[in-house]
Image: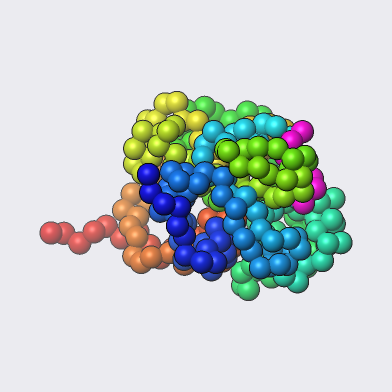
Amino acid sequence: MRCPHLPDGFDFTDPDLLQARVPHPEFALMRETAPVWWCTQPPHISGFGDEGYWAVTRHADVKYVSTHPELFSSNTNTSVIRFNETISRDQIDVQKLIMLNIDWSNKMAAYDDPEYAITEEVGAEAAMEIVAYSMNLAAARKECPAEEIVRWATPVVSFQRTATQDLELGGQRIRKGERVGLFYSSANNDPEVFDSPDVFDITRDPNPHLGFGGGGPHFCLGKSLAVMEIDLIFHAIADVLPDLRLLEDPRRLRSAWLNGIKQLQVTTAPPPAA
Ligand code: HEM
């Protein structure tokens, strides 16, 4: 077994880290050596005024926490694992009330990125519109590449819960009030659950990925819409732009918990004849 060793100060919610890459090698190390790992943070860096959080990286543990809301609350500190140093406790409580922890547009989700700064009011309005829309949707079609696309990309790297009592998880003692990060990006690459997790395979069946959450009461309300949209978008791209090719590396979003792309340079021209 390898030693659990990450560089001093390493933090899975560091927005600069996620702007550069998703830390898959570090997730693999933690799954293998310290699947429930205490990540120390400088006080107030996340907005919660504490000293860090537990990083949960194995599929089974992410599922366990998600399906035991009586032990792990998403209300105490919201589901957002890291705000920033300038947010006050009152502002976090406002976010709780208006469900800003479920935001999907640039305006709502990307407060860490200077290109997408917004006011609280605009974010709240957008959140409520999206929630209302998702609730009116019928079930989406099954069996499409979208599930593997979501596993592979895992757009939401992590959300969090807060322990409601002293308890044990993965051999670690967690105290009431401590935050627990659910690292979906890691769970979705857990070799205990997925054969060759680093292979993109749209025929995977079953595909029990946790890209929309680990089950339980907070499971993604918009999953059906998201799956349908991805299915339609990728089929349309394949039909209309068959020669789509990447020109350069993407420009990534600076975020503490989203795996986002801001810009992707492509060409739609047929490749030059050999
Ligand atoms: C690929 C796109 C999407 C991904 C990867 C995604 C992922 C997630 C995840 C990981 C959660 C947290 C589950 C948990 O805490 O247990 C969540 C919750 C939620 N999502 Fe999605 N989602 C997507 C699209 C959408 C869309 C399009 C909508 C609305 C139209 C939506 C609405 C929600 C809502 C309302 C919740 C909160 C449910 C609750 O707290 O009870 N999502 N989503």
Q: Residue 114's quadrant in the figure? A: bottom right
Residue furthest left as drawn: 274
Give whichever of 197, 105 is nearer the camera. Answer: 197
Give whichever of 183, 95 is nearer the camera. Answer: 183
Q: Residue at x 38, y 62 (%)?
A: 266
Residue 203 in the image: above or below residue 26: above
Residue 16 in the image: above or below residue 147: below
Residue 164: in magenta span:
no
* Residue 27 place in picture, x, y as percent: 46, 50
> Seen in the image, is 271 located left or right of residue 146?
left
* Magenta stretch secondary structure, dominant: loop
* Residue 12 place in picture, x, y as percent: 55, 58
Q: Residue at x 62, y 33 (%)?
A: 64
Q: Residue at x 62, y 60 (%)?
A: 40
- Is residue 232 at all visible to an observer of this figure? no
Give whichever of 227, 197 is nearer the camera. Answer: 197
- Is residue 163 at all visible to an observer of this figure? yes
* Residue 145 place in picture, x, y as percent: 44, 36
Residue 76: in magenta span:
yes
Q: Residue 61's quadrant in the figure? A: top right
Q: How many marks?
A: 0
Quarter in which the N terminus is drawn: top left
Give whichever of 239, 181 is nearer the camera. Answer: 181
* Residue 135 place in picture, x, y as percent: 74, 36
> Seen in the image, is 245 located left or right of residue 57?
left
Q: How is the image coloured?
A: rainbow
Q: Residue at x 80, y 64 (%)?
A: 120
Q: What stretch of residues is rendered in magenta?
A: 70-77
Quarter in which the C terminus is drawn: bottom left
